[in-house]
Amino acid sequence: MTVEPGFGGQSFLDVMLPKIRRTRELIDASGADIWLQIDGGVSTATIARAAEAGADTFVAGSAVYKAAEPDAMVQQLRGIAEQHPYQR
């Protein structure tokens, strides 16, 4: 979780980025094919930082459901995330 659990629409907690990086390092060191998913506060303003840290799977609830064009938002988020090294 990249927010305090409880309800949707919360802000992304940057304090989680070092934990994402460390988890990615452990996954890479293991050699296993494991996806690193984050959930909470994922938006166009946060997805790049999370992807750079090593996340490769994202749950973006409010950013998508509150968008005027949800399909376009999904494509925009995907485009941002795909610019970073850990994307499949």
Image (cartoon, helix red, strand yellow):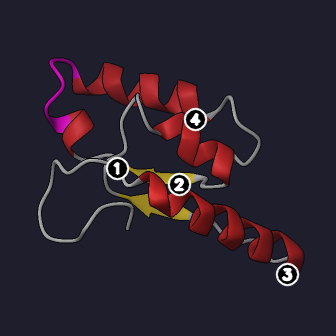
Q: Which residues are magenta?
A: 65-69
In percent of width and height, residue 62 lies at: 19, 42
Label located before the other in sequence (3 or 4) = 3
**Residue 71, located in which quarter of the rendered image?**
top left
Q: Is residue 64 above or below residue 61?
A: above
Label located before the other in sequence (3 or 2) = 3
- What's the residue type where badge 1 is placed? Phe
Q: To which residue does mark 2 refer?
A: 57
Q: Residues within 10 Å of mark 2 (few under 14, many from 20)?
A: some
- What's the residue type where badge 2 is placed? Thr
Label located before the other in sequence (1 or 3) = 1
Q: Nearer the viewer, mark 4 or mark 1?
A: 1
Secondary structure category for the residue under label 2: strand
Q: To which residue does mark 3 refer?
A: 30
Decide if residue 17 is on the left or right side of residue 1. right
Q: To which residue does mark 4 refer?
A: 81
| Badge 3 vs badge 2, beta-carbon distance below 8 Å | no
Label 2, label 1: how far apart the Cα atoms are:
15 Å
Secondary structure category for the residue under label 3: helix
